[in-house]
Image (tube, grey):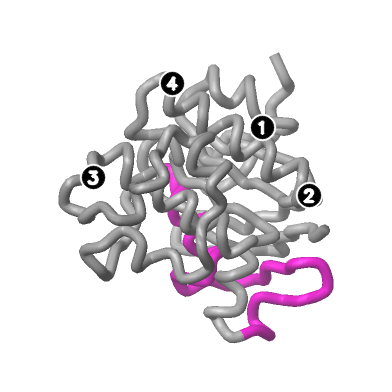
Amino acid sequence: MAILRLQQLITRHVGPIELSVAAGECVCIHGASGSGKTLLLRAIADLDPHDGEAWLDAESCSSLPAPDWRRSVALVIAESQWWSERVGDHFAMGVDAAWMEGLGLPTDALDWQLGRCSTGERQRLALLRTLMQAPAVLLLDEPTGNLDQESTQRVEALLDDYRRQRQAALLWVSHDTGQIDRVAARRFILRDGQLAEEARP
């Protein structure tokens, strides 16, 4: 169980940000296009230059090699990168068959060529690939942005199970207010580079 804590985090026009996300908690962020939501997640994942610090319990981002930090604090984006044509080549850690079924993916999907996958299938496979690394924190950048309603429900259910079973901390960027109402324990709007907490409806 791990707490994600941001301390005076600044990246480009975002910050300074102070925020804690507890183990087993889902916090959602929304805001206008260009407000810096993706920039914030990329800074937390140590993909972009930033000032300030991010902490996972007592370990600081700056004290760890970037690959180690990103295994524990994993960013999931709508359009993930792929480096091999065969889907299964991206699952060195194996795959949880129940998770695949939960996402509506057949077990033979690992034998597919990436080129035959739809955008939504690639998005669900990328999420599954990340979950197999067992991160303590998930940074979710519109993880259902390309999905239909049924697939969105499947992803929300799997992330909820993962959060509760692994006591993972979820920081979830979404433009869908209905989704935020469903999944968030706390919600913030990012405006003028600052996070402002909003009351639950």
Left or right of residue 117: residue 164: right
Q: Which mark is residue 150?
A: 4
**Side of 174 relative to 168 (left or right):** left
Q: Earlier in the sequence, mark 3 or mark 2?
A: 3
Query: In which quadrant will I find the C terminus?
Result: top right
Q: Of helix, strand and loop, which one carries label 2? A: loop
The residue pinned by badge 2 equals 167
Which is more toward the observer, 64 or 122?
122
Q: Do the residues bearing badges 1 and 2 touch, measured as CB atoms within 8 Å?
A: no
* Residue with the most extreme left position: 115
Q: How many neighbours does mark 4 have within 10 angstroms: few (below 14), some (14-19), or many (20 or more)?
A: few
- Residue 66 position, x and y percent, is 54, 80
**First-in-chain label (3 vs 1):** 3
Quadrant position of residue 165:
top right
> Residue 29 or 166: which is nearer the viewer?
166
Q: CA distance from mark 3 to mark 1?
A: 33 Å
Secondary structure at badge 1 equals strand
Q: Which mark is residue 5?
A: none
Q: In the picture shown, does residue 75 fall above or below 195?
A: below
User: As shown in the figure, which amino acid type bears the numbered disc 4?
Assistant: Glu
Crowdedness of circle 2 by 10 Å Cα count: few (<14), some, many (20+)? Answer: some
Q: Nearer the viewer, residue 78 or 123?
A: 123
Numbered mark located on residue 117 in the image: 3
Crowd class of label 3 (few under 14; some 14 to 19; many from 20; radius 10 Å): some
What percent of the width, then of the height, locates residue 67?
Answer: 53, 79
Earlier in the chain: of badge 4 and badge 2, it is 4
Q: Amino acid at mark 3?
A: Cys
First to last magenta residue range: 35-64
